[in-house]
Image: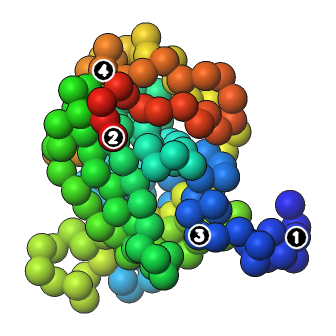
Amino acid sequence: MTSSAAASSSATQTPSQILSSTSWETTGAVDNAGKRRALSDPDVKTYVGYAYFDADGTFAMYNLDDTPKMQGDWKLTPDGKTRIITAKDENGKVRFTRSSPIETLTPLEFTYRTYPVQNNQSIYIDIVHTPTTHKAPIASSPAPSSSGSNSGSMAPSSMPSRPMSSHPTTPIAPGSR
């Protein structure tokens, strides 16, 4: 898609439609000083992976090795400037809720901001995602990664079987609504 086609497409879609219209892969990170940070950086690695935001308000995230990271519900604020995710376990119990300011949301880029130093918003890292054709893994993935232990990692049996399409639209887990 050319940038003018992307701009035209994003003008006809709501922010929620843009976010749920594609699968996303973490492809970069930039700090408040404008310095690129490695995806393996301790302040970045928890956020790295593949993300699938379904139009029904559910999501699944996987590490780059296709191990489950988290699942749950998502929404954007009415102005489209903040993404809110609620990570849930396999029984639908809330593990945490996280709000992240959106810096860029177009069909070609989804970037949100994180704050590695609690209560200090002058220090931040923007987590950059671009569309991917990577297929969502099937539930029989290997054991979950230990990276991002506070990110709501799920056991493989808790992750649902996802259809093999570039952006599945089935619910994440029974009782997770």
Verify CB contact (< 8 Å) between mark 4 and mark 1: no
Q: Is residue 146 left or right of residue 169?
A: left
At label 2, counting other C-alpha atoms closer than 10 Å, the crowd grade (few under 14, some 14-19, many 20 or more) is some
Q: Earlier in the sequence, mark 3 or mark 1?
A: 1
Answer whether residue 45 is visible to the viewer in this image.
no
Say which residue label 4 marks: 158
CA gap, disc 4 and disc 3: 29 Å
Say which residue label 1 marks: 5
- Rendered view: 113 above or below 71: below
Say which residue label 3 marks: 15
Query: Which quadrant of the figure contains the C terminus?
Result: top left
Amino acid type of the residue that numbered disc 4 sits on in the rendered structure = Ser
Say which residue label 2 marks: 177
Amino acid type of the residue that numbered disc 3 sits on in the rendered structure = Pro
Verify CB contact (< 8 Å) between mark 3 and mark 1: no
**Location of residue 107 in the rendering, given as x and y in whole percent from the top left corner:** 70, 64
Q: Residue furthest bottom?
A: 122
Residue drawn at x 56%, y 75% as measured from the top left: 104
Where disc 4 sits, the SS reads: helix
Residue drawn at x 80%, y 69% as measured from the top left: 9
CA gap, disc 3 and disc 1: 16 Å
